[in-house]
Image: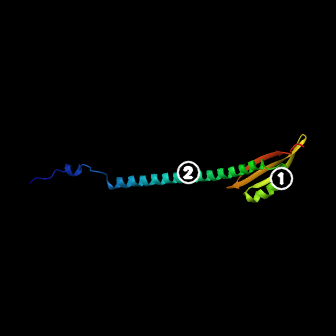
């Protein structure tokens, strides 16, 4: 009668991964994928916010550039009309330097509790 050697049962050759190793690998992959998706989402959110801010800033500057084309005597009237229309606030202050006077326009808009401003100075035309 021949007995089976005991070393065979202890030294089996491994073929593939165990269930525990596979589960650990999938858990790591799931965590890494979740992190990558979160980073991608926050990047897109930041880009969207930046584009909204840039769009609003360009709109404010555009209004300021349009005021450079308005005749000096019509500035206050046009500002009163344009304010509600363009979703910006326009504040007009008069100023004097040496022998000339002029108008200082502060064009403001708010986005996400931040104020965007553009300044326009117009000198009174010489007579």
Residue to which mark 1 is pinned: 74
Give the foreground label among 2 and 1: 1
Query: Alpha carbon of mark 2 to alpha carbon of mark 1: how far?
Result: 45 Å
| 105 versus 97 height, above or below | below
Q: Position of residue 56 (x, y in %)?
A: 68, 53
Q: Position of residue 57 (x, y in %)?
A: 69, 50
Residue situated in front as seen by the camera: 53 or 122: 122
Give the position of the C terminus as an image quadrant.
top right
Disc marking residue 43: 2
Q: Residue furthest top?
A: 98
Left or right: 110 in relation to 74: left
Circle 1 residues within 10 Å: few <14, some 14–19, many ≥20 = few
Mark sitting earlier along the chain (2/1): 2
Specify how the rendered protein is coloured: rainbow
Q: Residue at x 29, y 51 (%)?
A: 16
Q: Are marks 2 and 1 in contact (CB under 8 Å)?
A: no
Q: Residue at x 80, y 45 (%)?
A: 121
Q: Which element type, helix, strand or loop, lies under badge 1?
A: helix
Residue situated in front as seen by the camera: 53 or 5: 53
Q: Residue at x 74, y 51 (%)?
A: 63
Q: Position of residue 125 (x, y in %)?
A: 86, 44
Q: Which element type, helix, strand or loop, lies under badge 2?
A: helix
Left or right: 5 in relation to 94: left
Give the position of the N terminus as an image quadrant.
bottom left
Q: Residue at x 77, y 57 (%)?
A: 83
Q: Residue furthest left?
A: 1
Disc marking residue 109: none
Left or right: 47 in relation to 110: left
Residue situated in front as seen by the camera: 39 or 121: 121
Residue situated in front as seen by the camera: 115 or 97: 97
Question: On the image, which quarter does residue 99 sit in?
Answer: top right
């Amino acid at each position: 009668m021949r007995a089976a050697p005991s070393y065979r049962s202890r030294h089996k050759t491994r073929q593939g991964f165990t269930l525990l190793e596979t589960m650990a690998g999938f858990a790591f992959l799931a965590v890494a994928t979740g992190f990558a998706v979160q980073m991608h989402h926050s990047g897109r959110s930041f880009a969207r916010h930046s584009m909204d801010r840039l769009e609003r800033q360009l709109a404010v500057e555009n209004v300021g550039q349009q005021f450079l084309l308005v005749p000096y005597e019509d500035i206050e009237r046009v500002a009163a009309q344009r304010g509600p229309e363009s979703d910006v606030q326009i504040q007009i202050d008069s100023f004097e330097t040496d022998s000339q006077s002029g108008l200082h326009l502060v064009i403001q808009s708010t986005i996400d509790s931040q104020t965007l401003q553009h300044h326009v100075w117009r000198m009174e035309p010489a007579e």
